[in-house]
Amino acid sequence: MATAKQLATPGKGILASDESTGTIGNRFKQIAVENTHDNRIAYRDLLFKTPEIEKYISGAILYDETARDSDPDGVKFVEGLTKKGIVPGIKIDVGLTTIEGTNDETATMGLDGMAARAKEYYDMGCRFAKWRAVIKIDKANGCPSDQAIEETAHSLARYGSICQHAGLVPIIEPEILQDGAHSIQECAEISEKVFNAVQSAIIKYKLIQEGLLWKPNMITKGAECKDETSPEEVAFYTVRTLSRTIPPSVPGITFLSGGQPEETASLNLNAINKLAFPKHPWNMSFSYGRALQTSVLNAW
């Protein structure tokens, strides 16, 4: 509960720097940097040693390799972050697999052996975890299916329970993808259904609501939708959906950027926090990856 409250400090957000070796390689390829271990260390070191980063970042999500690595001065990244008052976290899932019998919908893997992994990460100094579940909207092909929603809710609740028993704050991340031509209203409808299913499973598995955070998608139109939407509309549908599904006992909501450009993600979050109605009880902040790092990569 103390860690969740610290992560939800007003005015601060979470840096998602948990790209796998393959994903960071894709980022490096765009700026013509070779994907070597030394380059990955140098890049993460650059992020974590940003001057005064601790004024704005309450936690940093790490990949397994980064959590075990040391900076060029020989100090473990986990220790360096902790000394700055930034809570180190860990990506604890092990990726996605297809749910057979569905239209290429996915389940997140990693429940097997997680209790031992969670204990090891706690002993290494990590204090929260992240598990990404993915839902796609494709009404023509029946997505999301009941199987995909049920799998997402079950796995997020099981992961959350295992993490809390190991002393880690679970970040609950059901991501409804922006891929597709759906409207903002359709995104709101599906997101509400998914978030309700996840919340129901969280209650069933007896998670401590005060000791977890949510990392949902903002309610936006699909990437191929031709409608014009404003940050104010995104804010209205996002807060309305969350206020219908997530209890006030949860200390914070840290949005994923979902591939939004940096400026769009910032404008939408700003509008969410300025919204007068419906009122929301949570600290609403960010847990951005690309929406914090794109400019950094380009400059580097």
Image: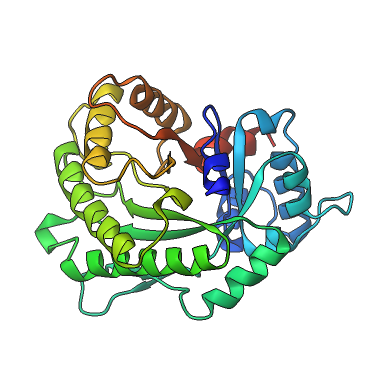
Instruction: Name which residue lies at 39% across and 35% down.
Output: 282
Residue 93 appearing in the image: no
Is 130 located above or below residue 82 in the figure? below
Measured from the top left, where is residue 208 in percent x and y?
Answer: 42, 56
Front residue of this view, candidates 208 and 200: 208
Q: Is residue 235 above or below residue 186?
A: above
Residue 147 visible, this orientation = yes
**Towards the viewer: 31 or 198:** 198
Rendered view: 181 above or below 166 = above
**Relative horizontal placement of residue 63, taking residue 173 as reference (left or right):** right
At x 44%, y 48%, the residue is 210
Q: Name the residue at 50% across, 63% down.
A: 164
Horizontal arrangement in the rendering, residue 176 relative to residue 3 (left or right): left
Task: List x then y, in percent, for residue 124.
Answer: 72, 63
**Above/below status of 152 relative to 280:** below
Q: Is residue 257 left or right of residue 240?
A: right
Q: Residue furthest right?
A: 73
Residue 170: where, in percent of width, then height? 48, 57
Query: Where residue 215 sits in the image (x, y, percent)?
Result: 41, 47
Q: Total of numbered circles in the picture? A: 0
Where, by quadrant of the figure, is residue 166 drawn? Answer: bottom right
Looking at the image, residue 21 sits to the left or right of residue 46; the answer is left
